[in-house]
Each structure stands twice: as structure tokens, then as C-alpha cells.
Image (tube, rainbow, N blue to C red):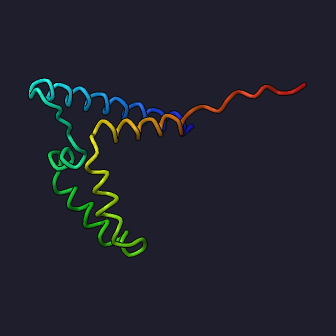
Amino acid sequence: MVRWLVRLLGLFAIAGALIALVVDGTRSIAASTLTLTSLGQAWFSFDPDSLAAAQAAVASHVEVYVGAWVWYPVIQFLLTLPVWLVFGALGALLVLAGKPRPFRAAVA
């Protein structure tokens, strides 16, 4: 029951990755140089308050249990990756996680 929802979310993520790839390609052609939009830059353009809130939440909750190394090297690295790469990888993982089970015939 939940597998189709996971696959659907994965397909939406892949569609978002394709849109981000087209936008980056269009900007690259217009600028005559490779132009990539990072996840952090896109998130800041979309909603800068939620980015600050996420950083504060990680600083207050996650660092207590895991440590201070979570935000700066790990999450900041993810925020520097291109949007299409992050959404494409997330979509591929969700599609694979929602893959239907193989049919097993009953042995007679």
C-alpha cells in the first residue's frame, strides 16, 4: 500500500531533478559557461527563513546527540551539491525502495 506512494514521491523527485537540470542547462547556454545552482542557493532563494530554522534545529537538537560536526562538514557539503544531483539521487533511492516485490509462484 505504501510502496506506490514511495515510488510516486520518487518520480516527483526525479521530475524536479529534470526541471532543475533544464534550468541549469538554459542558464549555462545563456551565460556561455557552466552554471550550476546549488541546493543551498535554491533553498535560500525559495525560503531563507526555513534554511535558518533548519540550521538552528540541527544546532540545538542534533548536535546534542551526534555532535557539532553534523552541520558544518556534512550538511554544508550537501547544500553545495547541484539541485538536480540531490533530487535525482533522492528520487532514484525512493523509486528503488518502492520497487514491487518479485512475483513468487507457488510450488506445487
At x 23%, y 26%, the residue is: 22
Location of residue 37 (image quadrant):
top left
Residue farthest to the bottom? 64
At x 49%, y 34%, the residue is: 95
Give residue 60's position: percent from left, percent from top. Answer: 31, 72
In this rendering, is residue 57 above or below 94?
below
Q: Nearer the viewer, residue 9 or 68?
A: 68
Q: Nearer the viewer, residue 31 or 14?
A: 31
At x 18%, y 47%, the residue is: 41
Total marks in image: 0
Q: Nearer the viewer, residue 39 or 60?
A: 39
Location of residue 34 (image quadrant):
top left
Relative to 17, 36 lies left or right: left
- Identify the image quadrant of the C terminus: top right
In this rendering, is residue 96 above or below 103?
below
Give residue 103's position: percent from left, percent from top. Answer: 71, 27
- Identify the image quadrant of the N terminus: top right
Residue farthest to the left? 31
Give residue 87's position: percent from left, percent from top. Answer: 34, 39
At x 27%, y 41%, the residue is: 82
Relative to 91, 72 lies left or right: left
Residue farthest to the front? 33
Residue farthest to the right? 108
Location of residue 19 (image quadrant):
top left
Give residue 40's position: percent from left, percent from top. Answer: 22, 49
